[in-house]
Image (cartoon, coloured by chain):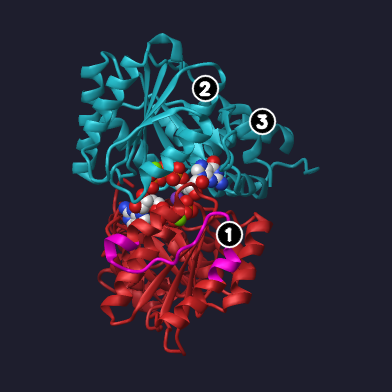
């Protein structure tokens, strides 16, 4: 901002940017500490340089080596989508189904949320929009039975991809977490190696609790990737930086709206630059 | 958080005992710990700043200095101040004592829990001997109407027969007249989730408000919301005459600092809290319990 001196004001301004973007106290403090030490070593001459260094640091945290999402590595390639209530799981499945279908892949959806009112009907609408088949049971059925049937159907129809929806659940509910583990086992029994990708959906509006969500879902079912939704609002979703630093689970996609094509691959550099847009 | 606030403050004051005198440094350290706890609980950066300024003075008082348990005293002050800011002692009940049918409108971001909370409210009101009707005014989300109809079936509460092709303003208007003719004393309007920056959809809510004049306009917010809670809540409050807030998903382990942020920027009472997915999981809001939760007690 046209200022050259690196003073306490600039540090506080950066601290505010990081904290209000939901990076969390620990991550923010670590970043600020490393800035302070570069400053006392005299390595930082201008506020622009400070900002630049911070952005590089953040991009580095978000860009670690991880297993890429390669849906051709198995057939059918099974993706299980999990997360707490209302984050955007079902919508994300609709968007993913559409993307894969447009790539010419045969996609099947499994309506593994048999609990929430009209969850299967909601997935059915997305299935119609993406023009893919949906396997569902009646409300109240055992979600593992849906997983089983969906896996069977995916094999029988020689599908390339099976996307399995699950009911929203808080990571603190032990029985519901056990249910996820069971679904995972059922998939593996029907299609060895499945699920090939367990995607945790996080709402960008969520604060520090998202880190706990990631930790506990990871402990229960081993995450492969994250989808960060609702980035079309004003929330920045900075908690994924803390998650990357602590758990090394990559963000695969970001959700930027409620329509079929509102899903993008995650781009660390762009994500970081938006953190600083105010 | 590694230690409780109480442990942290104890260690700050242990140093104090050696000196016997409360210095500016002690107060600063104390306030730094409290600031940390609040930020970790997702209270907004600016809200924390003004809160700290407010409590600093009280926390540096003689009564605390002379106390044998200064850490506990400071926590008490902070907790009291937090509860007060969250509406301790205020009336936070739903205000429905007007000529029926009384419209209640729920609004908020996508996925906050509006539709589920509509169902919960219907159950609560029926238990209070009212005769509510549910009104699906979300014509955008796939199967939103079906979702509310399912809840109505589970509760045996009538759901107005909306169609996805209709204008939500017309739905609410027609539902109000239908309720009048058919003896329903309350109508609960379930609106689509929307972003505060979506001017078109925010305009739609304003038109509903103008048309049916809801007695209660409740902002439904997810207890897990982070720093952005202030922006969203302030914006909804600015664009709509909100009468209160419902905080959902408090059955998890989120510390819920958003409650303080939302309350601070809107000044509107938090009226109810969602404690689960089941339809009877709607409870009264207790400011002091929320204060304790935010402080990690
Ligand atoms: N603005 C915005 N809204 C989104 C996005 N993704 C999902 N939503 C909306 O968020 C709400 C919840 O989405 P769902 O897909 O039903 O979420 P869910 O995780 O399946 O919810 P449960 O199954 O109830 O746990 C819906 O209104 C979606 O339209 C996004 O990227 N941006
Ligand atoms: N654990 C828990 N889940 C809740 C609570 N309230 C709502 N939910 C869940 O949150 C998810 C979203 O709830 P909805 O009622 O569909 O939310 P909404 O605000 O109507 O969503 P949109 O219409 O898409 O904006 C569902 O899975 C609900 O079961 C609560 O208090 N606790
Ligand atoms: K949410
Ligand atoms: Mg869902
Ligand atoms: Mg809804």
Circle 1 marks a residue in which chain?
B
Residue at image coords 65%, 55%? B197
Name the residue carrying label 2: A101
The residue where tag 3 is placed is A42
Q: In the picture, one chain is red; tell me its letter.
A: B
Disc ID at residue B166: 1
Q: In the image shown, does B215 or B266 lie closer to the viewer? A: B215
Q: Chain of mark 2?
A: A
Picture coordinates of residue A276, whole percent (x, y): 66, 41
Q: Which residues are magenta?
A: B152-172
Mark 3 Cα-neighbour bin, 10 Å: few <14, some 14–19, many ≥20: few
Cα distance between the residues tagged 2 and 1: 31 Å
> Is B201 left or right of A246, judged from the image as shown?
right
The residue closer to the viewer here, A40 or A25, is A25
Q: Residues within 10 Å of mark 2 (few under 14, many from 20)?
A: some
Quick check: A258 above or below B212?
A: above
Q: Is residue B153 magenta?
A: yes
**Would you say residue B223 is visible in this rendering?**
no
Q: Which chain is cyan?
A: A
- Mark 2 and mark 1 on one chain: no
Disc 2, SS: helix
Query: Residue B98 placed where, x, y %?
Result: 46, 89
Residue drawn at (45%, 36%) of the image: A242
Asked whether the residues under the numbered discs 2 and 1 touch, taking CB atoms below 8 Å apart as contact, a structural biologist would say: no
């Amino acid at each position: 901002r046209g200022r050259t001196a690196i003073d306490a004001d600039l540090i506080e301004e950066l601290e505010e940017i990081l904290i209000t973007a939901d990076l969390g106290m620990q991550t923010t403090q670590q970043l600020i500490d490393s800035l302070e030490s570069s400053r006392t070593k005299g390595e930082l001459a201008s506020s622009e340089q400070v900002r630049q260094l911070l952005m590089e640091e953040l991009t580095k945290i978000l860009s670690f080596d991880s297993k890429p999402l390669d849906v051709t590595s198995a057939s059918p390639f099974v993706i299980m989508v999990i997360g707490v209530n209302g984050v955007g799981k079902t919508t994300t499945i609709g968007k993913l189904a559409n993307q894969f279908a447009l790539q010419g892949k045969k996609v099947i959806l499994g309506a593994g949320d048999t609990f929430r009112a009209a969850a299967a009907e909601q997935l059915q609408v997305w299935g119609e929009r993406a023009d893919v088949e949906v396997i569902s049971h009646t409300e109240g059925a055992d979600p593992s039975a849906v997983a089983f049937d969906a896996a069977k159907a995916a094999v029988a129809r020689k599908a390339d991809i099976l996307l399995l929806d699950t009911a929203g659940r808080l990571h603190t509910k032990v029985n519901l977490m056990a249910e996820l583990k069971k679904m995972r086992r059922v998939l593996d029994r029907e299609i060895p190696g499945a699920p090939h990708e367990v995607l945790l959906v996080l709402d960008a509006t969520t604060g520090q609790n998202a880190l706990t969500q990631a930790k506990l879902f990871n402990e229960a079912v081993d995450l492969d990737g994250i989808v960060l939704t609702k980035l079309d609002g004003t929330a920045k979703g900075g908690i994924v930086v803390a998650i990357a630093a602590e758990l090394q689970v990559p963000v695969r996609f970001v959700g930027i709206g409620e329509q079929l094509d509102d899903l993008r691959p995650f781009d660390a550099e762009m994500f970081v630059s938006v953190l600083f847009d105010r | 958080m590694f230690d409780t606030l109480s442990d942290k403050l104890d260690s700050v004051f242990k140093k104090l005992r050696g000196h016997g005198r409360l210095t500016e440094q002690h107060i600063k350290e104390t306030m730094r710990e409290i600031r940390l706890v609040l930020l970790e609980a997702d209270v907004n950066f600016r809200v924390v700043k003004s809160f700290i300024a407010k409590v600093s003075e009280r926390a540096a008082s003689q009564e605390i200095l002379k106390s044998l348990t200064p850490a506990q005293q400071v926590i008490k002050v902070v907790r009291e101040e937090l509860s007060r800011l969250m509406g301790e002692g205020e009336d936070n009940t739903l205000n429905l004592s007007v000529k029926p049918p009384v419209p209640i409108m729920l609004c908020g971001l996508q996925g906050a829990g509006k539709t589920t909370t509509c169902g919960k409210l219907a159950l609560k009101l029926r238990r209070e001997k009212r005769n509510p009707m549910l009104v699906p005014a979300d014509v955008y989300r796939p199967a939103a109407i079906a979702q509310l109809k399912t809840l109505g079936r589970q509760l045996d509460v009538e759901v107005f027969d909306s169609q996805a092709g209709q204008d939500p303003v017309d739905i609410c208007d027609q539902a109000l007249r239908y309720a009048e003719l058919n003896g329903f004393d309350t109508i609960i309007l379930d609106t689509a989730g929307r972003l505060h920056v979506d001017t078109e959809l925010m305009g739609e809510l304003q038109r509903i408000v103008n048309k049916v004049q809801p007695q209660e306009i409740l902002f439904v917010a997810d207890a897990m919301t982070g720093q952005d809670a202030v922006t969203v809540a302030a914006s909804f409050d600015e664009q709509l005459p909100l009468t209160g807030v419902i905080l959902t998903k408090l059955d998890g382990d989120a510390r819920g600092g958003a409650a303080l942020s939302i309350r601070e920027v809107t000044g509107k009472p938090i009226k109810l809290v969602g404690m689960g997915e089941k339809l009877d999981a709607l409870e009264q809001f207790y400011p002091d319990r929320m204060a304790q939760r935010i402080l990690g007690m």
